[in-house]
């Protein structure tokens, strides 16, 4: 059983999109997966509700209060192979609960100054959490540009206490197209985006090794 949390106090960095793709990706590998939406906006809940009964099934629930999230995830832990938690883009009790529950934290960030600075904020939260528990965190460069130096510069600015995920996710329409219907990029019909699929497969391998 592994608990993965997609966390960043910054909004709009791809937490929900990544959570959805990881949850569906693991279910496709035959794992019994629970997705937990810790965000009041409920985007992950909506996406997986839109997915409906399509196989593989991914169970989803939403807890926006830290205490409820912690209690319920601990109860669910015996019944699932993997739990993927998506917290909202701000520091709140749900994010802090997820921070302490997770075996591995993935912090998506964009190759932009504001986003790189936000990693410092996460780094501070992680240090606080480490007073309680040994927390493992990876920064994941998402919506990366296909050219230019921004990606390398951003990767170089990852603060201490956060490791750089050895996989990068590019800015690709396929991710946005698939997510609304609760689909992973691997499930898109028609003109499937081979690069998006390769990135997500590499990410699945890196996160769940
Ligand atoms: N790799 C990607 N390529 C292109 N667009 C993306 C990618 N990942 C996410 N997006 C789009 O970027 C926007 C933000 O993504 P998402 O909702 O996953 O971020 P979030 O961190 O969960 O945001 P919030 O903090 O609001 O919950 C969405 O419109 C989504 O479709
Ligand atoms: Mg979100």
Image (tube, rainbow, N blue to C red):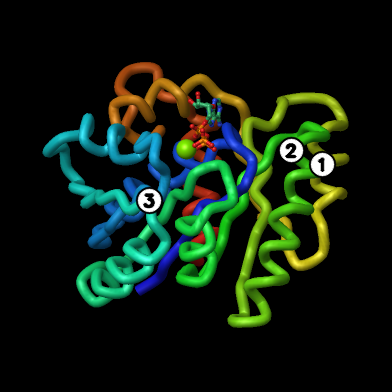
| Closer to viewer: mark 2 or mark 1 | 2
Which residue is labeled 3 in the image? 64
Circles 2 and 1 in contact, beta carbons < 8 Å: yes
Crowd class of label 3 (few under 14; some 14 to 19; many from 20; radius 10 Å): many
Which residue is labeled 1 in the image? 154
Residue drawn at x 41%, y 55% as measured from the top left: 85
Label 2 vs 1, first from the N-terminus? 2
Q: Quadrant of the N terminus?
A: bottom left
In front here: 98 or 169? 98
Label 3 vs 1, first from the N-terminus? 3
Residue drawn at x 80%, y 47% as measured from the top left: 155
Looking at the picture, how far across and down is residue 142, in whole percent? 63, 38
The reply to whether residue 114 is in sight is yes
153 vs 7: above or below:
above
The CB of the residue at mark 1 lies under 8 Å from ligand 1: no
Indicate the secondary structure of the residue bearing disc 3: loop
Indicate the secondary structure of the residue bearing disc 2: helix
In front here: 186 or 101? 101
The Cα–Cα distance between marks 3 and 2, rounded to whole angstroms, is: 24 Å
In front here: 177 or 71? 71
85 vs 172: above or below:
below
């Amino acid at each position: 059983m592994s608990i993965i949390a997609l966390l960043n106090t910054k909004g709009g960095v791809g937490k929900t999109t990544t959570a959805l793709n990881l949850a569906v990706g693991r279910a496709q590998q035959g794992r019994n997966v629970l997705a937990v939406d810790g965000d009041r906006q409920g985007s992950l809940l909506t996406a997986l509700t839109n997915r409906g009964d399509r196989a593989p099934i991914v169970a989803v629930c939403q807890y926006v209060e830290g205490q409820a999230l912690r209690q319920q995830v601990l109860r669910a832990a015996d019944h699932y192979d993997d739990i993927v938690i998506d917290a909202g883009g701000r520091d709140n009790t749900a994010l802090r609960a997820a921070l302490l529950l997770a075996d591995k934290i993935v912090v998506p960030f964009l190759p932009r100054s504001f986003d790189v600075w936000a990693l410092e904020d996460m780094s501070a939260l992680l240090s606080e959490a480490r007073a309680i528990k040994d927390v493992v965190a990876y920064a994941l460069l998402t919506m990366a540009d296909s050219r230019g130096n921004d990606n390398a510069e951003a990767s170089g600015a990852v603060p201490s206490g956060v490791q750089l995920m050895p996989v990068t996710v590019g800015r690709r329409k396929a991710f946005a197209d698939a997510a609304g219907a609760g689909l992973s990029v691997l499930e898109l019909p028609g003109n499937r985006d081979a690069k998006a699929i390769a990135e997500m497969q590499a990410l699945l391998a890196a996160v769940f090794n």
